């Protein structure tokens, strides 16, 4: 059974997983992408996404409407024991 499991993940490494995850994030709308970065703790690409958001909205609106929603999810997951900080 272990050999079958290992065969399923043959050729998979952290680099390929991160690349796939980055592609998934880029496919999301900007607000969802920012929230996912907060929830997942993904810093790579965050600055570029924030710069893009700042072109259409003021910073306070981005914080209040988008980033705090992501933090709310983090708080709920932490409170329920599903996430460690």
Image (cartoon, rainbow, N blue to C red):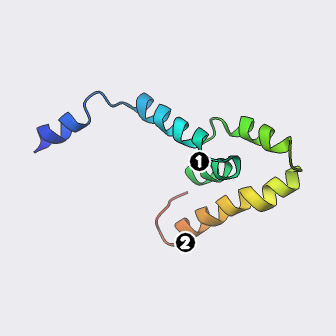
- Nearest the camera: 83 or 66? 66
Q: Quadrant of the C terminus?
A: bottom right
Q: Is mark 1 on a helix, strand or loop?
A: loop
Question: Where's residue 41, x and y in %?
Answer: 59, 48
Q: Residues within 10 Å of mark 2 (few under 14, many from 20)?
A: few
Task: Check whether the beta carbons of the residues at disc 1 and disc 2 lie within 8 A of each other.
Answer: no
Q: Furthest-bottom residue in view?
A: 80
Residue 70 picture quarter = bottom right
**Residue carrying label 2:** 79
Give above or below for 75 relative to 39: below
Residue 52 picture quarter = top right
Q: Furthest-left residue in view?
A: 1
Q: Quadrant of the N terminus?
A: top left
Q: What element carries label 2?
A: helix
Find residue 56 and name its label: none
Q: How crowded is mark 1: few (under 14 residues within 10 Å), some or many (20 or more)?
A: few
Indicate left or right for 56 with 24 as reference. right
Q: Residue at x 87, y 55 (%)?
A: 60
> How many dots with numbers?
2
Question: Where's residue 20, x and y in %?
Answer: 47, 35
Indicate left or right for 51 with 77 as reference. right
**Residue carrying label 1:** 41
Q: Earlier in the sequence, mark 1 or mark 2?
A: 1
Q: Residue at x 46, y 65 (%)?
A: 82
Q: Which residue is drawn at 50% across and 61% down?
A: 83
Indicate left or right for 21 with 8 as reference. right
In space, the residues marked 1 and 2 are separated at their CA atoms by: 17 Å
Question: Where's residue 53, x and y in %?
Answer: 79, 44
């Amino acid at each position: 059974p272990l050999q079958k499991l290992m065969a399923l993940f043959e050729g998979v490494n952290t680099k390929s997983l991160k690349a796939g995850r980055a592609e998934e994030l880029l496919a999301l709308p900007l607000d969802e992408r920012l929230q996912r970065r907060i929830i997942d703790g993904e810093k790579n690409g965050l600055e570029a996404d924030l710069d893009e958001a700042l072109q259409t909205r003021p910073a306070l609106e981005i914080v209040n409407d988008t980033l705090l929603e992501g933090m709310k999810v983090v708080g709920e997951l932490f409170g329920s024991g599903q996430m460690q900080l």
